Structure formats: structure tokens, C-alpha cells
Amino acid sequence: MERVAARLTGKINSARFNELTASQLYEILRLRSEVFVVEQECAYLDLDGRDIEPTTTHWWIEDERGRVVATARLLRMKPGSKIGRVVVASERRRSGLGAKIVEQALRVAPRPTYADAQSHLEEWYGRFGFVRDGDEFVEDGIPHVPMVLT
């Protein structure tokens, strides 16, 4: 079946867990599962309890049908913050949506801001000023590098 490309709303949305509608939460979790669990063939528990923390902010972009096509979350830490769960739907990759969400989140992210980047995305995170902050490690079968933005 051929996918029909829907237009984007053009809006970057953000909300805390208690501000999300059931549909928004469903769409965010659907996309994360679609990419991280199914596409990357990585069976892991995405629902780690951090999404519901009162200081966690979820960021997303929808198409005109309300489907989330890009998302990320920003966790508050002491000190600083951590950006993660950055994901873009396969048909929207290389469109700049991931960068738009990361840039928006970084505008409000307390420093230092950390990321556990998939190793092949180290250079991509570097575009935002992140630098490697330790040795490569394997999480859920996928190589990652710790990164920090000060």
C-alpha cells in the first residue's frame, strides 16, 4: 500500500505529561515504538517512568491528520537536563524535523544538557554543540555515545 504524504501543521508542540491528550500521548508512543522497537528491532521497555515526571517536557510535530511525525522529550536533571527519545517517522527523515524539535527544546533546556546518542548520530548531535562525554557503550544492542552541551 502506498503512503500518501500529508502536509505538516508546521507547529512544534510541547507539553508536560498531564497536559497531553490521550490522542497526543498515543501518537508519541506509537511513533517511538514504530521506530525504536519495530524498525530498529530492539525489544526494550520504552515506558521507563520518565515520561510522566512533572518536569519532563514532550515535543512533537504533527501532520495535518494529527499523526505525530517527529518527537523528543526533555528530562530535567540536577544539574541540567537530558534530551532523548528523538525520533522522526521514516518517510519524513532528512527533512529537518528532528533538528527543528531539538533546536526548540535546547532553547529552554537547562545546561548542561546531556544526550545518549546512537553512535551513528554523533556528528548530527555535534551540529547543536554537543561533544562526546565518555566512551561508547551498548544499550539494548545499539552502540551509543554519551554527549554533553554546556
Image: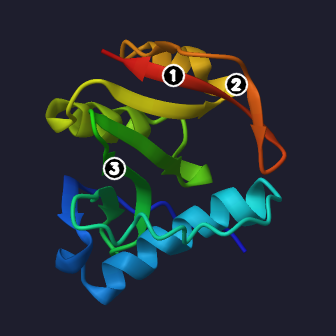
Query: Residue at (46%, 45%) from the top-left corner?
Result: 84
Instruction: Give the number of the disc on residue 120.
Output: 2
Query: Residue at (20%, 33%) from the top-left corner?
Result: 110
Mark 1 or mark 3, earlier in chain: 3
Q: Position of residue 146 (x, y in %)?
A: 58, 25
Question: Which colour assignment does the render follow?
Answer: rainbow
In the displayed structure, would residue 59 be above or below residue 96? below
Instruction: Name the amino acid, label 2.
Output: His
Q: Nearer the viewer, mark 1 or mark 2?
A: 1
In the displayed structure, would residue 130 be above or below residue 110? above
Please state which of residues 36 and 95 is positioned toward the viewer in this rendering.
36
Instruction: Give the number of the disc on residue 49.
Output: none
Quarter holding the C terminus is: top left
Q: Disc 3 marks which residue?
A: 75
Query: Residue at (36%, 18%) from the top-left corner?
Result: 149
Quarter holding the N terminus is: bottom right
The alpha-carbon separation of the residues under discs 1 and 3 comes to: 15 Å
Instruction: Name the amino acid, label 1.
Output: Met
Q: Residue furthest bottom?
A: 22
Q: Residues within 10 Å of mark 3 (few under 14, many from 20)?
A: many
Q: Judging from the image, what secondary structure is the residue with disc 1 in? A: strand
- The reply, left or right, for residue 112 in relation to residue 114 is left
Q: Residues within 10 Å of mark 1 (few under 14, many from 20)?
A: many
Q: Nearer the viewer, mark 2 or mark 3?
A: 3
Mark 1 or mark 2, earlier in chain: 2
Q: Judging from the image, what secondary structure is the residue with disc 2 in? A: helix
In the displayed structure, would residue 91 be above or below residue 133? below
Q: Disc 1 marks which residue?
A: 147
